[in-house]
Image (tube, grey):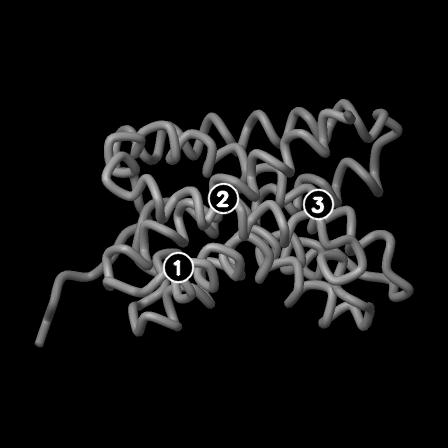
């Protein structure tokens, strides 16, 4: 199994579990849990592919959907243990985010359109955070990417770095892709540990 495929699997598992945790918080039934888990893991890629005018990858290759459903069911069954695994889920979520950013950026370059710096960053970001935005919207919460740590910012930076390396250097793609994954992962863990976030105004109302 290629390392990218393995990391993608880890990301799907982590994102599915984050959907399960959100569903448990809102006391959803098992169907609702599965929906949130699956949409969190696959939603970003589906949005990305629709915008790139192609059939979503998860529909053509259903492996991620099946994996997400299985993980969501397992998460529902062991719900009482999930919160004790919070740190592990955060770590795998950070790794999954980093991998999904690269997958999104790669998708921009394999599309039929010539996509520039910001377009690549957008595709990378949507792949990383799109599922979480749908998840939070379904349970009527402000999407976490708009209010906590550097989640979306890291996606944007990662997408831009991928574009710059891809267009302006001759460095092998595997090297800079792995480097960007490692950078996003480390920065995400640091942001979680030290609760780093962008500046925000205090409530003025």
| Residue at image coords 75%, 64% | 56
* Apparent side of residue 112 relative to residue 145 in the rendered image (left or right): right
Give the farthest residue toward the left.
205
| Residue at image coords 62%, 37% | 9
Which residue corresponds to mark 1? 33
Q: Return the residue nearer the eye: 195 or 53.
A: 53
Q: Position of residue 46 (x, y in %)?
A: 66, 64
Q: Position of residue 63 (x, y in %)?
A: 70, 48
Instruction: Choose the circle earlier in sequence order: 3 or 1.
Output: 1
Give the farthest residue toward the front.
77
Instruction: Choose the circle earlier in sequence order: 1 or 2.
Output: 1
**CA gap, disc 1 to disc 2?**
10 Å
Q: In terms of secondary structure, where does tag 1 sit?
A: helix
Which residue corresponds to mark 2? 71
* Apparent side of residue 81 relative to residue 94 in the rendered image (left or right): left
Q: Return the residue nearer the eye: 132 or 77.
A: 77
**CA gap, disc 3 to disc 2?**
21 Å
| Residue at image coords 39%, 72% | 138
**CA gap, disc 3 to disc 1?**
26 Å
Density class for disc 3 (Cα within 10 Å; few <14, some 14-19, many ≥20) is many
Q: Position of residue 74 (x, y in %)?
A: 43, 42
Q: Return the residue nearer the eye: 121 or 140.
A: 140
Which residue corresponds to mark 3? 103
Location of the N terminus by quadrant is top right
* Apparent side of residue 137 relative to residue 180 in the rendered image (left or right): left
Instruction: Choose the circle earlier in sequence order: 3 or 2.
Output: 2
Instruction: Check contact, mark 1 vs mark 2: CB within 8 A.
Output: no
Q: In terms of secondary structure, where does tag 2 sit?
A: helix
Q: Decide: is 205 above or below 29.
A: below
């Amino acid at each position: 199994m290629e390392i990218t495929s393995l990391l993608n699997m880890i990301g799907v598992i982590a994102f599915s579990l984050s959907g399960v945790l959100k569903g448990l918080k809102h006391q959803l039934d098992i169907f609702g849990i599965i929906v949130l888990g699956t949409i969190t893991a696959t939603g970003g890629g589906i949005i990305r592919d629709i915008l790139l005018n192609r059939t979503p990858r998860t529909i053509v290759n259903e492996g991620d959907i099946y994996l997400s459903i299985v993980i969501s069911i397992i998460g529902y069954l062991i719900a009482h243990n999930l919160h004790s695994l919070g740190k592990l889920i955060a770590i795998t979520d950070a790794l999954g985010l980093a991998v999904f950013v690269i997958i999104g950026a790669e998708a921009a370059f394999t599309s039929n359109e010539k996509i520039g710096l910001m377009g690549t960053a957008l595709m990378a970001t949507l792949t990383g955070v799109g599922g979480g935005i749908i998840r939070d919207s379904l349970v009527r919460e402000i999407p976490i990417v708009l209010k906590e740590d550097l989640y979306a910012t890291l996606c944007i930076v990662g997408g831009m770095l991928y574009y710059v390396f891809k267009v302006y250097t001759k460095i092998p793609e595997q090297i800079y892709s792995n480097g960007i994954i490692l950078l996003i992962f480390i920065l995400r863990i640091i942001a979680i540990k030290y609760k780093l976030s962008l500046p925000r105004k205090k409530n003025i109302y």
